Amino acid sequence: MFTTKELELFKSQNTPFYYYNMELLEQTLQSLTKASQKYNYHVHYAFKANTNHEILELIQSYDLGADCVSGNEVLKAKATNFPSSKIAFAGVGKSDDEINIGLDNDIFCFNCESLPEMEVINELAEKKGKIAPIALRINPNVNAKTHHYITTGLEENKFGINRWELEEVLNKLKVYKNLKLIGLHFHIGSQITDLSAFKSLCLRVNEVQQWFYSHHIIVDHINVGGGLGIGYENPDSNSIPDFESFFDLFNEILELRPKQELHFELGRAVTAQCGSLISKVLYVKKGIKTNFAIVDAGMTELIRPALYQAYHKVENITTDELEIDKYDVVGPICESSDCFGKALYLPITKRGDLVAIRSTGAYGEVLSSAYNLRSKAESIYSSNLNI
């Protein structure tokens, strides 16, 4: 729901553009930090969700860490004042250059995903005369009950070290003198709305912890990743995730050892609801079974619906028309998959109307592209517009 002042300001902007409600982001961060500090949990913001500079600066001001999956994300974290001591570097395919970036910046931890990666980090750290802190990303084989493209914790996924490899991992750690094991890392997927998946994760982490304990190993921290979902269907009534229930579950079920820290990597839950993609209707074309509302935003500005049929609420924010009709809301890109929603019931829509595609603060701007030589959409912030 947008205010009258917001709507007036939207009319003066060139479309399409990303609109960020910074007040909502701040409220979300306040809720997140209050819930996590209750248990002294450590939260790293997952940079892959949104690397907009203003967004990152506000997140950093709440003393969150950074979860990075590329060398450039590590550099961006440093550029936006995230301390090296709070930067975790994950990713299944870290290049030598990227590993060296992490080593040169003395980051908190490398989340290692394979035996070959451990070998390479050890070699590069040895060349620099450094000891690389690592956490083992262990594949928990837990079903996240989400879309198969964003499920990461099953044995058939490319991520993580499988449990039958752990004996060999421990043997290698005795040889790799430039690695220091400080943590165990887990991540089962994204956009998880069924908290029972996290309960299953906790039980599996307890099992893995016991296995390491039986081998006389207690690591400094456990990292359970992220994945907490948001309410795409009703962004106004579900604007801030239930962080309290999320963290309460881990406190209730996960068995930490004395002085052991628990870390999280949340991205979508932090930024998704504060962002909207604002677009203008170019044409309304009559079809046989539906109408087509052709807008000036496309899969170049928001690829999620084209990539895995993700749902985003679409609203006509111009008209007060009570009469409704059925529309496929589509973009201008030369691909049939360039569609934001099919058979949507909207107020009677006409050329020039503004359309808001909601919940785009995560995996919207950050996944944008120049396909069809499209110009990059601008970003506009409520705080800059004195709303």
Image (cartoon, rainbow, N blue to C red):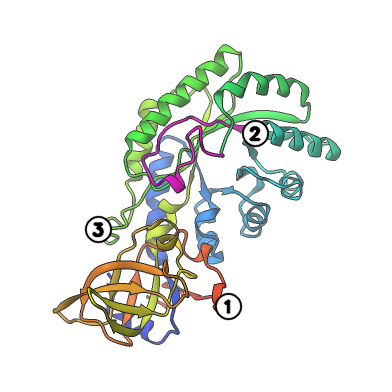
Q: Is residue 325 left or right of residue 138?
A: left
Picture layout, residue 128 above or below residue 182: below
Marks 2 and 1, the one that precedes in the sequence: 2
Q: CA distance from mark 2 to mark 1?
A: 38 Å
Q: Amino acid at mark 3?
A: Ser
The kind of secondary structure element at disc 1 is helix
Disc tally is 3
The quarter in which the C terminus is drawn is: bottom left
Residue 314 sits inside the magenta stretch: no
Q: CA distance from mark 2 to mark 3?
A: 42 Å
Q: Residues within 10 Å of mark 1 (few under 14, many from 20)?
A: few
Mark closer to the observer (2, 3):
2
| Mark identifier at residue 114 | 2
Picture layout, residue 302 above or below residue 121: below
Residue 165 visible, this angle: yes
Q: Which residues are magenta?
A: 135-158
Picture layout, residue 366 above or below residue 170: below
Residue 180 drawn at (x, y percent) = 70, 29
Residue at the spot 27% in from the left edge and 69% down from the top edge: 1
Marks 2 and 3, the one that precedes in the sequence: 2
Residue 336 drawn at (x, y percent) = 42, 69
Q: CA distance from mark 3 to mark 1?
A: 37 Å
Residue 156 drawn at (x, y percent) = 51, 35
Q: Which residue is mark 1?
A: 373
The kind of secondary structure element at disc 2 is loop
